[in-house]
Image: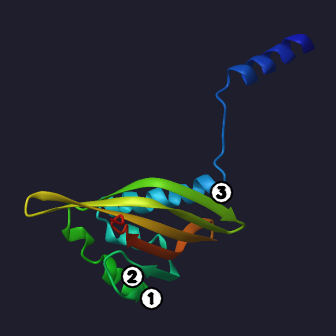
Amino acid sequence: MNYVRVMLVSLVIVTSPVITFAGPKEDVAAATQAWADAFNAHDLERVLKLYDPEAVLWGTVSPMLRDTPASIRDYFKGLPNQPQLKVNLGEQHTRVYGDSGINTGSYTFTNVRDGSPVTVPARFSFTYHQRDGHWLIVDHHSSAVPAAPR
């Protein structure tokens, strides 16, 4: 009887799907993807929920440092009115240090102006802090990629 039980348990283990758990690096990368998904859905409230109340934003198209929830809201307030504006994530480098994480990489913004597509290649750094089990953005820097030297 023990032999049958051992065989059944072994069979269940061998034929069960492999269960993998995401680690902190994958969670931080997923938080960045959640930001891109909310941005592409033009969901202002969903974007803002991803920022910590003490977050700081250096946006791509603003000369001002945004360091309050109200100023970050102001930066993104036009998002729902730009249905053709999209962001596409590029290469990313994710690091985690305890309850803080950094994701640095590139993204491309695409919009339509006067019927023609306009793309802006940019680079980003998102710094995250884990609060109540969620990775929230505490620092977001974004800047357009400068033209190559001639």
Q: Where is mark 1, residue-wise?
A: 68
Question: Marks 3/1: CA distance?
Answer: 27 Å
Q: Which mark is residue 72?
A: 2
* Figure check: 134 above or below 117: below
Instruction: State the scheme by which the image is colored.
Output: rainbow
Residue farthest toward the right in the current orientation of the protein? 2
Q: Where is mark 3, residue-wise?
A: 24
Residue at 48% x, 74% y is: 140
Q: Is residue 1 visible?
A: no
Q: Nearer the viewer, residue 140 or 68?
A: 140
Q: Could you tell me if the residues under marks 2 and 3 are in contact, i.e. CB atoms within 8 Å?
A: no
Residue 97 percent location from the top left of the image: 70, 66
Question: Marks 2/3: CA distance?
Answer: 26 Å
Q: Nearer the viewer, residue 15 or 84?
A: 84
Residue farthest toward the left in the current orientation of the protein? 114
Question: Marks 1/2: CA distance?
Answer: 6 Å
Which quadrant does the N terminus fall into? top right
Q: Residues within 10 Å of mark 1 (few under 14, many from 20)?
A: some
Q: Quadrant of residue 28?
A: bottom right
Q: Amino acid at mark 2?
A: Ile
Q: Residues within 10 Å of mark 2 (few under 14, many from 20)?
A: many
Secondary structure found at label 2 = helix
Residue at 65% x, 57% y is: 24
Instruction: Say whether disc 2 or disc 3 marks the residue closer to the N-terminus.
Output: 3
Specify whether 120 is left or right of 47. Answer: left
* Figure check: 80 above or below 62: above
